[in-house]
Amino acid sequence: MNKFLVIGLCVGGLAATAGGALALREISPKQASVVAVKPITAGMEQPYAEVVQVLELADPDAPRFVDVLAATAVTEPGRDEEICETVTVTHQAPAKDQHQIAGTAAGAVIGGVLGNQVGGGNGKKAATAAGAIVGGIIGKNVQANHQAKQTYQTTERQCRIERGEDRVTGYEVTYQVDGESASVFMDHKPGKQLPLVMDKPITDKAEIKRLSQNRAPSTYEVFYEHDGQAGSMVMSKAPKVGALLVMEEGRVVTDPRHLADIQARQDQVVAYQVTYRLGEDLHQARTTEKPQVGEIVTVKNGHLLLADGAKGKQSL
């Protein structure tokens, strides 16, 4: 026999033996310890598509409706008006004795008489003089107060100018069309939108109401991305850009009842993420049964076997 053939057979046999031993070692069960268990809910695995663009699909035969940005009132000054009325005016009656001489004299006499009754000799004279002075002052004040109360009334016609209120004559309305702003004068304040017919805004109030009431419902083409793939669909309501759409079997769920059923199951636990230690390394596996932390489990053929025989596929 050729010696090289013999050598080849020997080497091949050794390699096959070593490979078999490695394969046997790989499929042999190993013991591992559970380190952590985390529940996996349906909501955590629910696929979503992200909205990237929304376009309104307008009927070409229907009027367009554009957004009103601002409505500034246009006014004209009010007319000034002269207001006249007859009023009663109270006047001070003219005094016949402007210096209150009569009151001063009468007060001095009375004061002198009273002062003369005090003391005797030179004291009596001083008291008489002082009484006359004080009495004169009091008499003057009494007469002055009496004269101040003497009034009479007359009627007079008085006029004043009142400024009229500014009157609103209309509104300067600014609206947005195709990303640009334009303006139009209207005799009434508009709502949030204006209809355009032949690219011209409708300003008649009755016509705006008619077009708004007969407005066809809008539809929207919604563009989305899911797992790097782009898609689009027509929807009756416009979602916001960045919103998440529920996916199922590669399609966006639009049926309200089905969508409600899916959302009702979001918190339902469907599996468990198990972290276990095998030797010095940590590994993770997904199981349908919940092991306990610290539990000893078996790893065989890349799968995690729980004590009750449940099997979870190891995550790579």
Image (cartoon, grey):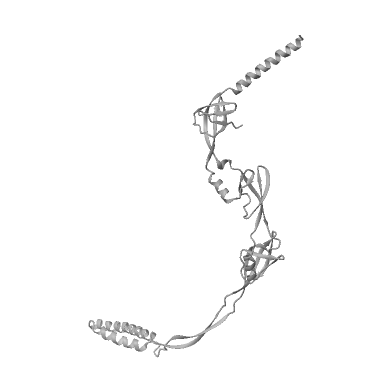
Q: Nearer the viewer, residue 49 or 122?
A: 49
Q: Position of residue 216 (x, y in %)?
A: 64, 62
Q: Nearer the viewer, residue 207 or 255?
A: 255
Q: Position of residue 123 (x, y in %)?
A: 25, 81
Single out the residue that lies furthest toward the left: 120
Question: Which quadrant: the N terminus?
Answer: top right
Question: Which quadrant: the C terminus?
Answer: top right
Q: Nearer the viewer, residue 72 or 205?
A: 205
Up the image or down, 286 lies above or below 199; here it is: above
Residue depicted at 26% across the width and 86% down the height: 113
- 186 on left or right of 41: right
Single out the residue that lies furthest toward the right: 2
- 108 on left or right of 77: left
* Number of numbered discs visible in the structure rendering: 0
Up the image or down, 54 lies above or below 26; here it is: below
Residue depicted at 68% across the width and 15% down the height: 14
Single out the residue that lies furthest toward the bottom: 96
**Quadrant housing residue 10:** top right
Q: Position of residue 285 (x, y in %)?
A: 57, 32
Residue depicted at 66% across the width and 19% down the height: 19
Q: Position of residue 186 (x, y in %)?
A: 65, 70
Q: Nearer the viewer, residue 115 or 240?
A: 240
Up the image or down, 141 lies above or below 260; here it is: below
